[in-house]
Image (cartoon, grey):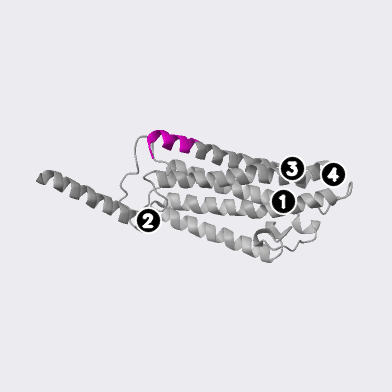
Amino acid sequence: MAEPSPGTGPAPDATTGVPRWVKVFVLLGAVVVALAVIAMLAGHGPGDRGPGGHLGTAEAHPPVAAEHHP
Amino acid sequence: MGPRLRKFSLVVHVVASVGWLGAASVFLVLGLVGLTSQDAAVVRGVYLAMEAAGWTVLVPFALASLGTGLVQAFGTKWGLLRHYWVVVKLVLTLLGAGVVLLYTETLAYLADLATRSTAGDISGLRDIGPVMHAGIGMLLLLVAVTLSVYKPPGMTRYGHRRQMQREQARQRGQGTVAAS
């Protein structure tokens, strides 16, 4: 996960504050999560099948083919 | 961590991560076959295969990638929370591994459906879930790999604090040497 450049460690980092790429990343991630939550609440999420998908509930959903066709 | 051990742990981490990416790509293909194949036996087989592969390949590689990544972080000067690229990679890996673990329940459910479905009756079996999960998982892993290679700049507050402490310790050491 975290490996230094060959033969060298991390260079001293003079940048302060949160870098712009991190802010963009967090924003994109928030948008994706929001879309996923909306999709799940609308009943079309990928985790809707089976035991609650990401919610981890034990209740199984009956198979409904029409829901899951793009 | 000495250089040899560091390189070895890096090899293990890369193998685990690439294995995870490979497993995700296979799941993507299996998911697509399950969605599109007109052969009932193939569709059933796909969901049975995914359940087996989930526990034997996907979960072990995901957990190994996470574990070896932590070893790399703690065993090198990059640390776990000092640089934003490491933190973002950690978040992505935790998210990916968590979803993989949770999704095994759904894979088991789909495999059970496949076992119970009668010959020819597969209309209720097709699921876009595996395709979406695999696709999003691959995207997360590709972002993680990109971060590992490019290592975009940006140090966290904690990282800056640690850097300042190191600098101060070094200057104190140099001052002591100069005085003597």
Disc 4 target residue: B40
In this view, which residue lies farthest toward the bottom? A41
Task: Please indicate whether residue B150 sits to the left or right of residue B16 in the image.
Answer: left
Give the Cα distance between marks 1 and 2.
38 Å
Disc 3 target residue: B49
Task: Say which amino acid is labelled 4.
Answer: Ala
Give the Cα distance between marks 2 and 3.
43 Å
Q: Which of the two labelled residues, at mark 1 and mark 4, occupies the earlier sequence position?
A: 4
Q: Are marks 1 and 2 on the same chain?
A: yes
Residue range corresponding to the magenta coloring: B1-11
Instruction: Indicate which label's residue lies in the foreground, 1 or 4.
Output: 1
Q: Residue at x 69, y 48 (%)?
A: B131
A42 within the magenta span: no
Q: Are marks 4 and 3 on the same chain?
A: yes
Give the Cα distance between marks 1 and 4.
18 Å
Instruction: Indicate which label's residue lies in the foreground, 4 or 3.
Output: 3
Q: Are marks 1 and 4 on the same chain?
A: yes
Q: Element under label 3?
A: helix
Q: Which of the two labelled residues, at mark 4 and mark 2, occupies the earlier sequence position?
A: 4
Label 4 lies in what chain? B
Label 3 lies in what chain? B
Q: Element under label 4?
A: helix
Report the disc number at residue B107: 1
Task: Say which amino acid is labelled 1.
Answer: Leu
- Decide if residue A45 is in sight here: no
Q: Which of the two labelled residues, at mark 3 and mark 1, occupies the earlier sequence position?
A: 3
Disc 2 target residue: B156
Q: Are marks 3 and 1 on the same chain?
A: yes
- Mark 1 neighbour class, 10 Å CA radius: few under 14, some 14 to 19, many 20 or more: many
Query: Which corner quadrant of the image does residue B49 belong to?
Result: top right
Task: Say which amino acid is labelled 2.
Answer: Thr
* Residue B78 pos. (x, y %): 38, 46
